[in-house]
Image (tube, rainbow, N blue to C red):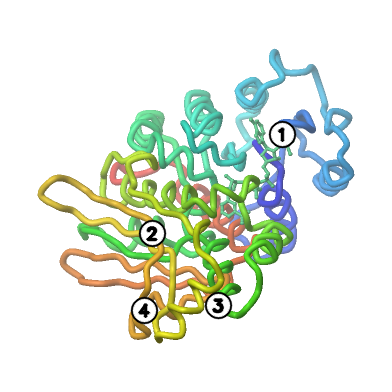
Amino acid sequence: MGFGHVGRRLVSLLDEMADALPFTADVIAIGTRRHGLAIDARGLDTARALQQVIRGDRLSDLHAGPPPDEATGTGLIAAVAQRCAADAARGHVVCIESTVLDITRGEPACTHIATALAHGLHAVTVNKGPAAFAAQTLAAQARQARRWFLHEGAVMDGIPVFNLVRDTLPGVRVDGFRGVINTTTNFVLSALAGGQSFDHAVAEMQARGIAEADPSLDIDGWDAAAKTAVLVNVLMQGRLSPHEVARTGIGHLTADAVRKVEASGDRLRLVASAARTPDGIRASVAPQALPAHDPLAGVDDTDNALYLSLDPLGELGIVQRGGTLTHTAYAVISDLACIARSPIPEEHS
Ligand SMILES: NC(=O)c1ccc[n+]([C@@H]2O[C@H](COP(=O)([O-])OP(=O)(O)OC[C@H]3O[C@@H](n4cnc5c(N)ncnc54)[C@H](OP(=O)(O)O)[C@@H]3O)[C@@H](O)[C@H]2O)c1
Protein backbone atom coordinates (compact mmCIF):
# COMPACT_ATOMS: atom_id res chain seq x y z
CA MET A 1 0.00 0.00 0.00
CA GLY A 2 1.58 3.23 -1.21
CA PHE A 3 4.06 3.48 -4.07
CA GLY A 4 5.63 6.89 -3.52
CA HIS A 5 9.26 7.79 -2.82
CA VAL A 6 9.76 4.99 -0.30
CA GLY A 7 7.76 2.27 -2.10
CA ARG A 8 9.52 2.99 -5.39
CA ARG A 9 13.00 3.03 -3.81
CA LEU A 10 12.14 -0.24 -2.07
CA VAL A 11 11.43 -2.13 -5.31
CA SER A 12 14.64 -0.87 -6.92
CA LEU A 13 16.69 -1.67 -3.77
CA LEU A 14 15.25 -5.19 -3.63
CA ASP A 15 16.57 -5.67 -7.18
CA GLU A 16 19.96 -4.10 -6.43
CA MET A 17 20.47 -6.20 -3.28
CA ALA A 18 18.87 -9.43 -4.55
CA ASP A 19 22.10 -11.46 -4.54
CA ALA A 20 23.01 -10.35 -1.02
CA LEU A 21 19.65 -10.95 0.67
CA PRO A 22 18.75 -14.03 2.72
CA PHE A 23 15.32 -14.21 1.03
CA THR A 24 13.72 -13.69 -2.37
CA ALA A 25 10.77 -11.37 -2.80
CA ASP A 26 8.05 -10.96 -5.42
CA VAL A 27 5.91 -7.83 -5.50
CA ILE A 28 2.44 -9.25 -6.11
CA ALA A 29 0.26 -6.19 -5.52
CA ILE A 30 0.56 -2.40 -5.47
CA GLY A 31 -2.13 0.03 -4.35
CA THR A 32 -2.02 3.82 -4.37
CA ARG A 33 -4.58 6.60 -3.99
CA ARG A 34 -4.43 8.10 -7.50
CA HIS A 35 -2.86 5.35 -9.63
CA GLY A 36 -5.32 2.63 -8.70
CA LEU A 37 -4.22 -0.90 -7.96
CA ALA A 38 -2.80 -4.01 -9.58
CA ILE A 39 -2.51 -7.60 -8.40
CA ASP A 40 -0.69 -10.41 -10.17
CA ALA A 41 -0.06 -13.44 -7.98
CA ARG A 42 2.76 -14.50 -10.36
CA GLY A 43 4.63 -11.27 -9.57
CA LEU A 44 4.20 -7.78 -11.02
CA ASP A 45 6.61 -6.24 -13.51
CA THR A 46 7.94 -3.60 -11.07
CA ALA A 47 10.07 -1.80 -13.67
CA ARG A 48 6.90 -1.17 -15.68
CA ALA A 49 4.97 -0.18 -12.56
CA LEU A 50 7.72 2.35 -11.71
CA GLN A 51 7.61 3.87 -15.19
CA GLN A 52 3.83 4.09 -15.22
CA VAL A 53 3.54 5.76 -11.81
CA ILE A 54 6.35 8.24 -12.59
CA ARG A 55 4.55 9.09 -15.86
CA GLY A 56 1.34 9.62 -13.87
CA ASP A 57 -0.46 6.64 -15.46
CA ARG A 58 -2.73 4.19 -13.70
CA LEU A 59 -1.58 0.68 -12.76
CA SER A 60 -4.74 -1.14 -13.84
CA ASP A 61 -3.29 -2.62 -17.07
CA LEU A 62 -0.79 -4.59 -14.92
CA HIS A 63 -3.66 -6.24 -13.05
CA ALA A 64 -4.28 -9.96 -13.72
CA GLY A 65 -7.54 -11.77 -12.93
CA PRO A 66 -10.87 -10.48 -11.62
CA PRO A 67 -10.82 -7.06 -9.91
CA PRO A 68 -11.08 -6.99 -6.09
CA ASP A 69 -14.60 -6.58 -4.67
CA GLU A 70 -13.79 -3.00 -3.70
CA ALA A 71 -11.07 -0.74 -5.11
CA THR A 72 -9.81 0.42 -1.69
CA GLY A 73 -6.74 -0.43 0.34
CA THR A 74 -8.64 -2.91 2.49
CA GLY A 75 -10.23 -4.43 -0.65
CA LEU A 76 -6.78 -4.87 -2.18
CA ILE A 77 -5.35 -6.48 0.97
CA ALA A 78 -8.32 -8.88 1.25
CA ALA A 79 -8.02 -9.81 -2.44
CA VAL A 80 -4.29 -10.50 -2.13
CA ALA A 81 -4.89 -12.66 0.95
CA GLN A 82 -7.61 -14.62 -0.87
CA ARG A 83 -5.46 -15.29 -3.93
CA CYS A 84 -2.40 -16.28 -1.91
CA ALA A 85 -4.37 -18.57 0.40
CA ALA A 86 -4.94 -20.84 -2.61
CA ASP A 87 -1.18 -21.18 -3.11
CA ALA A 88 0.26 -22.92 -0.05
CA ALA A 89 3.81 -22.93 -1.50
CA ARG A 90 3.90 -19.16 -1.81
CA GLY A 91 5.91 -18.43 1.36
CA HIS A 92 5.21 -15.48 3.59
CA VAL A 93 2.86 -12.76 2.41
CA VAL A 94 3.63 -9.30 3.79
CA CYS A 95 1.62 -6.09 3.52
CA ILE A 96 4.09 -3.18 3.26
CA GLU A 97 2.37 0.03 4.31
CA SER A 98 3.97 3.25 3.00
CA THR A 99 1.07 5.67 2.70
CA VAL A 100 1.37 9.24 3.96
CA LEU A 101 1.31 10.20 7.65
CA ASP A 102 -2.14 11.27 8.89
CA ILE A 103 -1.55 13.20 12.09
CA THR A 104 -5.18 13.23 13.24
CA ARG A 105 -5.74 9.45 13.65
CA GLY A 106 -3.06 7.56 11.70
CA GLU A 107 -5.57 6.46 9.07
CA PRO A 108 -5.95 4.70 6.72
CA ALA A 109 -2.62 3.12 7.71
CA CYS A 110 -3.93 1.64 11.00
CA THR A 111 -6.83 0.02 9.13
CA HIS A 112 -4.49 -1.31 6.43
CA ILE A 113 -2.31 -2.99 9.09
CA ALA A 114 -5.30 -4.36 11.03
CA THR A 115 -6.84 -5.73 7.82
CA ALA A 116 -3.57 -7.38 6.79
CA LEU A 117 -3.20 -9.09 10.19
CA ALA A 118 -6.85 -10.14 10.19
CA HIS A 119 -6.31 -11.86 6.83
CA GLY A 120 -3.18 -13.73 7.98
CA LEU A 121 -0.61 -11.42 6.36
CA HIS A 122 2.44 -10.03 8.14
CA ALA A 123 2.57 -6.22 8.26
CA VAL A 124 5.56 -3.91 7.85
CA THR A 125 5.29 -0.13 7.80
CA VAL A 126 7.49 2.95 7.43
CA ASN A 127 4.51 5.12 8.34
CA LYS A 128 4.61 6.46 11.93
CA GLY A 129 0.80 6.50 12.20
CA PRO A 130 0.14 2.87 13.21
CA ALA A 131 2.64 2.71 16.10
CA ALA A 132 1.96 6.33 17.12
CA PHE A 133 -1.82 5.84 17.39
CA ALA A 134 -2.39 2.09 17.86
CA ALA A 135 0.88 0.40 18.88
CA GLN A 136 -0.57 -1.72 21.70
CA THR A 137 -3.74 -2.73 19.84
CA LEU A 138 -1.92 -3.73 16.66
CA ALA A 139 0.84 -5.53 18.58
CA ALA A 140 -1.81 -7.52 20.49
CA GLN A 141 -3.62 -8.36 17.24
CA ALA A 142 -0.33 -9.48 15.67
CA ARG A 143 0.54 -11.65 18.69
CA GLN A 144 -2.87 -13.30 18.56
CA ALA A 145 -2.61 -13.89 14.80
CA ARG A 146 1.00 -15.11 15.22
CA ARG A 147 2.12 -12.64 12.60
CA TRP A 148 4.67 -9.82 12.66
CA PHE A 149 3.83 -6.13 12.91
CA LEU A 150 7.16 -4.37 12.27
CA HIS A 151 7.95 -0.68 11.75
CA GLU A 152 11.73 -0.23 11.79
CA GLY A 153 11.52 2.57 9.21
CA ALA A 154 9.16 4.68 11.33
CA VAL A 155 12.07 6.20 13.30
CA MET A 156 15.63 6.85 12.05
CA ASP A 157 14.99 5.18 8.72
CA GLY A 158 17.12 2.03 8.26
CA ILE A 159 19.27 2.37 11.36
CA PRO A 160 18.19 -0.29 13.86
CA VAL A 161 16.29 1.07 16.83
CA PHE A 162 13.34 -1.27 17.45
CA ASN A 163 15.17 -4.35 16.12
CA LEU A 164 18.20 -3.43 18.21
CA VAL A 165 16.25 -3.21 21.47
CA ARG A 166 14.02 -6.22 20.74
CA ASP A 167 16.72 -8.59 19.50
CA THR A 168 19.82 -7.59 21.42
CA LEU A 169 18.74 -6.10 24.76
CA PRO A 170 16.55 -8.72 26.49
CA GLY A 171 15.41 -7.69 29.96
CA VAL A 172 16.68 -4.13 29.59
CA ARG A 173 14.26 -1.31 30.46
CA VAL A 174 14.15 1.90 28.43
CA ASP A 175 13.62 4.73 30.92
CA GLY A 176 13.77 7.60 28.45
CA PHE A 177 15.50 9.07 25.43
CA ARG A 178 16.76 12.26 23.77
CA GLY A 179 17.25 12.60 20.07
CA VAL A 180 17.32 14.56 16.86
CA ILE A 181 14.94 12.45 14.81
CA ASN A 182 13.47 14.72 12.12
CA THR A 183 15.75 15.08 9.12
CA THR A 184 14.00 18.00 7.40
CA THR A 185 14.09 20.34 10.41
CA ASN A 186 17.69 19.40 11.17
CA PHE A 187 18.65 20.17 7.59
CA VAL A 188 16.80 23.49 7.75
CA LEU A 189 18.49 24.50 11.04
CA SER A 190 21.92 23.58 9.62
CA ALA A 191 21.14 25.53 6.43
CA LEU A 192 19.99 28.63 8.34
CA ALA A 193 23.19 28.55 10.40
CA GLY A 194 25.16 28.35 7.14
CA GLY A 195 23.41 31.38 5.64
CA GLN A 196 20.87 29.62 3.37
CA SER A 197 17.18 30.48 3.34
CA PHE A 198 14.43 28.52 5.12
CA ASP A 199 12.42 27.98 1.92
CA HIS A 200 15.45 26.84 -0.07
CA ALA A 201 16.32 24.22 2.56
CA VAL A 202 12.74 22.87 2.66
CA ALA A 203 12.67 22.71 -1.15
CA GLU A 204 15.93 20.74 -1.09
CA MET A 205 14.41 18.19 1.32
CA GLN A 206 11.34 17.90 -0.92
CA ALA A 207 13.54 17.39 -3.98
CA ARG A 208 15.35 14.53 -2.21
CA GLY A 209 12.01 12.91 -1.29
CA ILE A 210 12.77 13.28 2.43
CA ALA A 211 10.27 15.96 3.55
CA GLU A 212 6.75 14.77 4.35
CA ALA A 213 4.21 15.11 1.50
CA ASP A 214 2.96 18.11 3.53
CA PRO A 215 6.24 19.66 4.83
CA SER A 216 4.41 21.64 7.52
CA LEU A 217 4.19 18.30 9.37
CA ASP A 218 8.00 18.46 9.66
CA ILE A 219 8.30 22.20 10.33
CA ASP A 220 5.57 22.28 13.00
CA GLY A 221 7.14 19.34 14.83
CA TRP A 222 4.35 16.84 14.10
CA ASP A 223 6.62 14.29 12.45
CA ALA A 224 8.99 14.38 15.44
CA ALA A 225 6.02 14.20 17.84
CA ALA A 226 4.68 11.12 15.99
CA LYS A 227 8.12 9.48 16.17
CA THR A 228 8.35 10.36 19.86
CA ALA A 229 4.98 8.68 20.46
CA VAL A 230 6.18 5.58 18.55
CA LEU A 231 9.35 5.38 20.68
CA VAL A 232 7.37 5.83 23.92
CA ASN A 233 4.68 3.33 22.96
CA VAL A 234 7.00 0.62 21.66
CA LEU A 235 10.18 0.96 23.74
CA MET A 236 8.65 2.25 27.00
CA GLN A 237 5.25 0.49 26.73
CA GLY A 238 3.52 3.85 27.05
CA ARG A 239 0.21 4.95 25.57
CA LEU A 240 0.88 8.43 24.21
CA SER A 241 -0.66 9.86 21.08
CA PRO A 242 1.35 12.46 19.12
CA HIS A 243 -1.18 15.01 20.44
CA GLU A 244 -0.01 14.32 24.01
CA VAL A 245 3.61 15.16 23.19
CA ALA A 246 4.35 18.79 24.15
CA ARG A 247 5.32 20.25 20.77
CA THR A 248 7.05 23.36 19.45
CA GLY A 249 8.19 23.44 15.82
CA ILE A 250 10.80 25.58 14.08
CA GLY A 251 8.49 27.67 11.86
CA HIS A 252 8.91 30.76 14.06
CA LEU A 253 12.72 30.72 13.91
CA THR A 254 14.48 33.28 11.73
CA ALA A 255 17.97 32.95 10.25
CA ASP A 256 19.07 35.78 12.57
CA ALA A 257 17.81 33.94 15.65
CA VAL A 258 19.61 30.74 14.63
CA ARG A 259 22.88 32.57 13.86
CA LYS A 260 22.70 34.42 17.19
CA VAL A 261 22.59 31.10 19.05
CA GLU A 262 25.47 29.74 16.93
CA ALA A 263 27.53 32.90 17.58
CA SER A 264 27.30 32.19 21.32
CA GLY A 265 28.90 28.79 20.71
CA ASP A 266 25.70 26.77 21.13
CA ARG A 267 23.86 24.79 18.40
CA LEU A 268 20.11 24.96 17.86
CA ARG A 269 18.53 21.53 17.38
CA LEU A 270 14.94 20.22 17.40
CA VAL A 271 15.17 17.82 20.33
CA ALA A 272 12.69 15.02 21.00
CA SER A 273 12.74 13.55 24.48
CA ALA A 274 10.80 11.41 26.93
CA ALA A 275 11.25 10.36 30.55
CA ARG A 276 9.39 8.40 33.19
CA THR A 277 8.14 10.67 36.00
CA PRO A 278 5.99 9.98 39.09
CA ASP A 279 3.05 11.30 36.99
CA GLY A 280 3.69 8.97 34.06
CA ILE A 281 5.73 9.34 30.90
CA ARG A 282 6.35 12.94 29.83
CA ALA A 283 7.45 13.65 26.25
CA SER A 284 8.30 16.77 24.28
CA VAL A 285 9.61 18.10 20.99
CA ALA A 286 11.15 21.59 20.96
CA PRO A 287 14.08 23.58 19.58
CA GLN A 288 16.88 23.76 22.15
CA ALA A 289 20.19 25.65 22.28
CA LEU A 290 22.71 22.92 23.04
CA PRO A 291 26.25 23.47 24.33
CA ALA A 292 28.94 22.20 21.93
CA HIS A 293 29.79 19.26 24.22
CA ASP A 294 26.22 17.87 24.02
CA PRO A 295 26.33 14.78 21.75
CA LEU A 296 23.25 16.08 19.88
CA ALA A 297 24.98 19.39 19.06
CA GLY A 298 27.12 17.76 16.36
CA VAL A 299 24.17 16.17 14.57
CA ASP A 300 24.17 18.14 11.29
CA ASP A 301 22.30 18.29 7.99
CA THR A 302 20.56 14.95 7.32
CA ASP A 303 22.11 13.20 10.34
CA ASN A 304 19.87 11.79 13.09
CA ALA A 305 20.82 10.61 16.57
CA LEU A 306 19.03 8.94 19.45
CA TYR A 307 20.35 8.38 22.98
CA LEU A 308 18.43 5.81 25.02
CA SER A 309 18.55 5.69 28.83
CA LEU A 310 18.69 2.03 29.72
CA ASP A 311 18.34 0.22 33.04
CA PRO A 312 20.82 -1.32 33.88
CA LEU A 313 23.09 -0.30 30.97
CA GLY A 314 23.06 3.49 31.16
CA GLU A 315 23.15 5.54 27.97
CA LEU A 316 23.29 4.01 24.50
CA GLY A 317 23.71 6.26 21.45
CA ILE A 318 22.61 5.47 17.91
CA VAL A 319 23.76 7.83 15.15
CA GLN A 320 22.77 7.89 11.49
CA ARG A 321 25.09 9.91 9.27
CA GLY A 322 23.40 11.25 6.14
CA GLY A 323 19.90 9.74 6.00
CA THR A 324 18.51 9.05 2.50
CA LEU A 325 15.54 7.28 0.94
CA THR A 326 17.78 4.22 0.60
CA HIS A 327 18.01 4.07 4.39
CA THR A 328 14.20 4.07 4.70
CA ALA A 329 13.77 1.45 2.00
CA TYR A 330 16.42 -0.65 3.72
CA ALA A 331 14.39 -0.54 6.94
CA VAL A 332 11.66 -2.49 5.13
CA ILE A 333 14.22 -4.97 3.85
CA SER A 334 15.55 -5.54 7.37
CA ASP A 335 11.98 -6.17 8.57
CA LEU A 336 11.39 -8.62 5.70
CA ALA A 337 14.60 -10.44 6.67
CA CYS A 338 13.30 -10.68 10.23
CA ILE A 339 10.07 -12.29 8.98
CA ALA A 340 11.99 -14.68 6.70
CA ARG A 341 14.23 -15.67 9.64
CA SER A 342 11.44 -16.46 12.09
CA PRO A 343 8.04 -16.44 10.37
CA ILE A 344 6.20 -17.08 13.64
CA PRO A 345 7.13 -14.38 16.14
CA GLU A 346 8.10 -15.43 19.63
CA GLU A 347 6.02 -14.29 22.60
CA HIS A 348 8.29 -11.32 23.54
CA SER A 349 7.80 -9.62 20.17
N1 LIG B 1 10.45 9.84 2.45
C1 LIG B 1 11.19 9.57 3.53
O1 LIG B 1 12.40 9.87 3.59
C2 LIG B 1 10.58 8.81 4.68
C3 LIG B 1 11.40 8.38 5.74
C4 LIG B 1 10.82 7.65 6.79
C5 LIG B 1 9.46 7.41 6.79
N2 LIG B 1 8.69 7.88 5.76
C6 LIG B 1 7.25 7.60 5.79
O2 LIG B 1 6.95 6.75 4.70
C7 LIG B 1 5.63 7.02 4.23
C8 LIG B 1 5.69 7.23 2.73
O3 LIG B 1 6.55 8.29 2.44
P1 LIG B 1 6.83 8.70 0.92
O4 LIG B 1 7.93 9.69 0.97
O5 LIG B 1 6.96 7.47 0.09
O6 LIG B 1 5.44 9.44 0.58
P2 LIG B 1 4.86 9.80 -0.86
O7 LIG B 1 5.96 9.90 -1.86
O8 LIG B 1 3.96 10.94 -0.68
O9 LIG B 1 4.00 8.50 -1.25
C9 LIG B 1 2.87 8.11 -0.54
C10 LIG B 1 2.17 6.99 -1.27
O10 LIG B 1 1.01 6.63 -0.51
C11 LIG B 1 -0.12 6.62 -1.38
N3 LIG B 1 -1.31 6.96 -0.62
C12 LIG B 1 -1.55 8.09 0.07
N4 LIG B 1 -2.74 8.00 0.69
C13 LIG B 1 -3.27 6.80 0.35
C14 LIG B 1 -4.48 6.13 0.63
N5 LIG B 1 -5.39 6.71 1.40
N6 LIG B 1 -4.67 4.90 0.13
C15 LIG B 1 -3.74 4.33 -0.67
N7 LIG B 1 -2.56 4.91 -0.97
C16 LIG B 1 -2.35 6.13 -0.48
C17 LIG B 1 0.20 7.64 -2.44
O11 LIG B 1 -0.61 7.40 -3.56
P3 LIG B 1 -0.78 8.50 -4.73
O12 LIG B 1 0.59 8.87 -5.19
O13 LIG B 1 -1.53 7.76 -5.76
O14 LIG B 1 -1.51 9.65 -4.08
C18 LIG B 1 1.68 7.35 -2.67
O15 LIG B 1 1.83 6.24 -3.50
C19 LIG B 1 5.12 8.22 5.01
O16 LIG B 1 4.28 7.77 6.04
C20 LIG B 1 6.40 8.83 5.59
O17 LIG B 1 6.16 9.47 6.81
C21 LIG B 1 9.21 8.55 4.71
Q: Report the mark closest to the observer, 1 or 2.
A: 2
Q: Report the mark closest to the observer, 1 or 4.
A: 4
User: In the rendered image, which residue does mark 2 sit on?
Assistant: 286
Query: What amino acid is labelled 4 in the image?
Result: Pro
Is residue 202 shown above or below 92? below
Residue 247, which numbered label? Answer: none
Element under label 3?
A: helix
Q: Residue, x 34% and y 55% (percent of image)?
A: 166
User: In the rendered image, which residue does mark 4 sit on?
Assistant: 295
| Label 2 crowd (10 A; few <14 / some 14-19 / many >=20) | some
Q: Quadrant of ligand 1?
A: top right
Separation (CA) of disc 4 from disc 2: 17 Å
Image quadrant for the C terminus? top left
Out of 80 and 263, give the one closest to the viewer.
Answer: 263
Separation (CA) of disc 1 from disc 3: 38 Å
Numbered-mark total? 4
Whether the residue under disc 1 has CB within 8 Å of ligand 1: yes
Image quadrant for the N terminus? top right
* Residue 157 percent location from the top left of the image: 53, 59
